[in-house]
Structure formats: structure tokens, C-alpha cells
């Protein structure tokens, strides 16, 4: 069997054709430099490719998609390059088992099997025999080290998964395709329709949520207008280490997230946005103002960059597209707190949540008409905790804004989680 091998800078997900074909030598150079490129495997008489391989060593990533004759993706493999440069982790694999040629790609009823693996030996295998809505059977895969890891092939010597899946006994003959001249697309930037290596969730323009007059949307209400943030008070962080975590779960290892800040007292704010909608219960247009985020303001300087704070055991090289990290809550509650007084503040928080006993006003403040619920103070250290409500349980990312000098200017949690509220394209503040 003769298989044509072509190289390109990217793969267009909409048209399913290579973007900017390149020669094998140029692909070899990109491989050595860690730059992204794709390899497309085709055979005569078939419109759909057999397999498309994606490589971007600077992103610690290699992967492939296998297609059937109908052009549907049937298998996906996600490999990660970690500390050992000679081998790759089988981070994720997926198989779709279409019940007939008429079934659409990724049909909700299509049976599928996915496997997720971690370098420490953990993993999960999920079987969905009737697709996404038919129930799932989840097990822990029992795989040997040689099944979790694979040798990193040298350039041009990757095995073809398609041939193994189809049980070909004769080794295929590979022919290198000539690189066709790239069409003039008017620029050097890779189009948004092209595949890119997986990247974690991005902050967007979080600072705009605190700029009055900016228009935002939460996906439900198409237009919401930011109003003046509400200042709730201050939080004392004498230890110089801010904790951001859910105070309602087991914290045997301490807070989930910590952010170093200069010792001091910092303003607590909540971002507000006003919107009008038709209320079915009242039968008329109603205007309301909702909290979109809470912030601990460290400095008045504007943030020029935002980053998602990682937990101590996170490894960005293992993240999937739009994956988040953050603190967990099963009681729809988060908090800002002085990490130096974390344990006594947690004990105090638990006591404060019990309404059947007298609460000392020197260590307790009840906050009303706000997403902030209460504030507690540890007498011994002076460290404080401010609890706030979220819109549900789950994981909430913590975003740190930095000024041009790289110093922390604010720590923000979107109370609705991810993707949260994002400013509309081209939004500007009202004059």
C-alpha cells in the first residue's frame, strides 16, 4: 500500500486541508526548533486523509487523529513530552465506534471509549456504549509502564496508527508529497480555524469587569453594563501570603491556592454589572444588578497581564484545551484569607456558621446585600478571612493581575466560574 506523506504548518479544522504546505526539510527544521507543524497521510482514491499528526515540542505536545473513509475522526491520541526527552506519555486517547456510515461525526449516540493517564500512575478509563446520554462505565486502567509511555521517534520515523488499527500485515510504502505553493492568505498569522496545541483557560480582559461603562456578556444576557465596583471593607494579611480557597471542604494540606503579597490590609471589592431582561414571572422588563467577580485590590495600578494561579501539584504540560485550575467548593463558598492564620481562621469560620451561639463582634462581621458573606479575625495574629458566595459548587480559577513591573495589583475570582463574564469585542468604557 502506497501512502503519500505531506507536511504543513497547520491543519484547517473547517476545510480539513493543510494550511501552508511545507517541504520535508522545512518540517525537519521546525521539529528541531520545537515549532508546530502537521503531517498528513493520504492514499490514492480516498478523499479523506488516513491520519493527521500534530507536533509542537515547545508545547510538549504530539498527537494524531485517525479518519475513516467518510472523513469522520475515529481515534485520537494525545502524547506529552515531560522530563525525559526520550519518551512520551500517553496522556489521553479516544475512540469513536460509529454504528453505520450514516452516523454523523461525534454523534451523541456514538459509542466511545476514552482513557486519561497521568505520569504518577493514576488514570481513568470511560466506556460509553450508547454515547454521551446512555450512561458510562468508569474504571481504573491497569496498564504497565510500557503501555503508559512510548519511545519518542526521531523525525520521519513515526509509526502509522491507521495501519495498526486496520490490521495491515504488509508495511506501507511512504512517498513524500511535493509541497504545493501556499496561497496568499494576506498575513503570517495562523487562521483561527486551524488546530493549535492545547492551552489552559485564558483570563480574557478580567480587569474590564471593574471599569464602569464597559459592556459585557455572560452568555445568557447579551448585554450587561459594568457599574462602579462596590467596596466592602479591607482584609488584613499580616503574613504576606494570601490564601484563596473554599473554606467548606477538608483542608488537611492547607489552602488550595496561595498568592504572595506585601504584608498589609487590602480593599475587598465586588464587580457589578447591570442588565435588563424580560421577567416571565412579572410579565415586564426588569433591570437588575449582579455581582460578576470579587477582588482583593493590592495596588491601584492597572493590570497589564492576568494569569491563572496553579495549585502546588499542577503541571501545565498536562493541561487540556481550556482546562482550569483553582480552589474547590462543595458549599458554593470561597474565601480570601491570611494563609499565616489559616488553621485558626478555618476553626473560626466553622464556628461562625453555627447560628445557635453568640458570636463575638470583635472577631466576626456579618456582611449583608453582597456576595461577601462574613469576615472573621484571628486575635492572635491579626490575620483575617472574608468568605464570599459563588453561584454553585465546583472549581473556581483564581486570577492574578500584574502591573508593568510584574508586581501583583489584584486577585480576582469570577463568582460564576468559567467561562464567566467576558467583555464584548471592542467594548470601551463610557465617557
Image: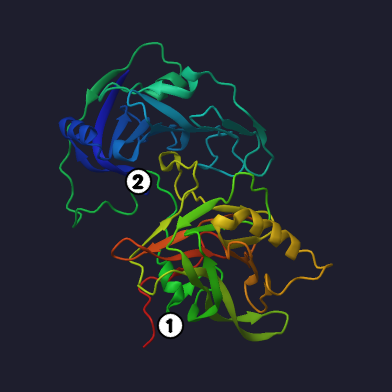
Residue for point 18% across, 33% down:
29
Q: Which residue is mark 2?
A: 196
Residue 216 place in picture, x, y as percent: 46, 73
Seen at 51% across and 56% down, the residue is 397
Q: In this orientation, does residue 218 appear? A: no
Q: Position of residue 124 (x, y in %)?
A: 59, 32
Q: Quadrant of residue 388?
A: bottom right
Quadrant of the rendering where the N terminus is positioned: top left
- Above or below residue 160? Residue 191 is below
Q: Along the horizontal axis of the image, is 293 left or right of 181?
A: right
In the drawing, does residue 105 fall left or right of residue 7? right
Which badge, 2 or 1, is on the more N-terminal residue?
A: 2
Residue 256 makes an appearance in the image: yes
Q: Does residue 176 appear to the left or right of 344 in the view shown?
A: left
Residue drawn at x 27%, y 22% is 154
- Give the x, y percent position of residue 194: 33, 48
| Disc assigned to residue 361 | none
Q: Quadrant of the C terminus?
A: bottom left
Q: Residues within 10 Å of mark 2 (few under 14, many from 20)?
A: many
Whether residue 317 is situated above or below residue 375 in the rendered picture:
above
Give percent across and percent down for residue 366. Answer: 69, 74
State the residue lying farthest toward the front: 380
User: Between 222 and 122, which is closer to the camera in this rendering?
Assistant: 122
Look at the numbered discs 2 and 1 and tell me whether their residues touch, using CB distance below 8 Å. no
| Mark 1 crowdedness (10 Å alpha carbons): few <14, some 14-19, many ≥20 | many
Residue denoted by label 1: 213
In the image as oriented, which residue stretches furthest toward the right? 356
Amino acid at each position: 500500500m502506497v501512502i503519500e506523506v505531506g507536511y504543513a504548518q497547520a491543519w484547517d479544522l473547517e476545510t480539513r486541508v493543510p494550511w501552508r504546505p511545507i517541504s520535508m526539510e522545512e518540517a525537519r527544521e521546525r521539529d528541531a526548533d520545537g515549532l508546530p507543524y502537521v503531517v498528513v497521510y493520504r492514499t490514492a482514491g480516498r478523499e479523506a486523509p488516513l491520519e493527521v499528526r500534530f507536533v509542537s515540542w515547545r508545547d510538549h505536545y504530539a498527537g494524531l487523529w485517525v479518519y475513516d473513509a467518510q472523513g469522520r475522526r475515529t481515534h485520537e491520541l494525545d502524547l506529552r513530552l515531560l522530563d525525559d526527552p526520550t519518551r512520551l506519555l500517553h496522556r489521553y486517547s479516544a475512540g469513536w465506534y460509529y454504528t453505520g456510515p450514516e452516523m454523523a461525526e461525534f454523534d451523541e449516540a456514538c459509542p466511545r471509549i476514552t482513557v486519561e493517564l497521568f505520569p504518577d500512575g493514576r488514570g481513568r478509563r470511560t466506556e460509553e456504549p450508547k454515547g454521551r446520554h446512555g450512561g458510562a462505565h468508569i474504571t481504573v486502567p491497569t496498564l504497565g509502564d510500557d503501555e503508559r509511555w512510548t519511545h519518542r521517534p526521531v523525525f520521519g520515523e513515526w509509526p502509522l496508527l491507521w495501519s495498526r488499527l486496520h490490521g495491515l500485515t504488509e508495511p506501507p510504502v511512504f512517498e513524500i508529497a511535493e509541497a504545493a505553493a501556499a496561497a496568499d492568505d494576506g498575513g503570517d498569522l495562523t487562521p483561527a480555524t486551524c488546530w493549535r496545541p492545547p492551552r489552559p483557560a485564558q483570563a480574557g480582559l478580567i480587569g474590564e469587569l471593574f471599569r464602569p461603562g464597559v459592556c459585557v456578556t455572560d452568555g445568557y444576557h447579551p448585554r450587561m453594563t459594568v457599574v462602579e465596583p462596590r467596596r466592602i471593607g479591607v482584609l488584613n494579611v499580616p503574613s504576606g501570603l494570601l490564601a484563596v480557597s473554599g473554606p467548606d471542604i477538608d483542608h488537611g494540606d492547607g489552602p488550595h491556592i496561595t498568592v504572595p503579597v506585601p504584608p498589609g490590609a487590602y480593599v475587598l471589592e465586588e464587580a457589578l454589572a447591570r442588565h435588563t431582561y424580560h421577567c416571565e414571572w412579572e410579565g415586564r422588563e426588569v433591570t437588575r444588578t449582579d455581582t460578576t467577580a470579587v477582588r482583593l485590590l493590592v495596588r491601584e495600578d492597572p493590570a497589564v497581564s492576568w494569569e491563572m494561579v496553579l495549585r502546588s501539584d499542577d503541571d501545565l504540560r498536562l493541561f487540556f484545551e481550556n482546562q482550569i485550575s483553582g480552589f474547590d467548593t462543595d458549599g458554593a463558598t470561597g474565601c480570601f484569607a491570611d494563609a499565616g492564620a489559616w488553621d485558626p481562621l478555618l476553626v473560626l469560620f466553622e464556628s461562625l456558621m453555627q447560628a445557635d451561639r453568640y458570636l463575638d463582634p470583635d472577631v466576626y462581621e456579618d456582611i449583608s446585600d453582597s456576595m461577601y458573606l462574613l469576615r472573621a479575625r484571628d486575635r492572635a495574629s491579626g490575620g483575617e478571612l472574608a468568605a464570599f458566595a459563588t453561584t454553585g459548587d465546583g472549581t473556581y480559577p483564581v486570577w492574578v493581575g500584574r502591573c508593568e513591573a510584574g508586581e501583583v495589583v489584584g486577585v480576582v475570582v469570577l463568582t460564576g466560574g468559567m467561562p464567566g463574564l467576558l467583555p464584548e469585542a471592542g467594548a470601551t468604557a463610557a465617557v
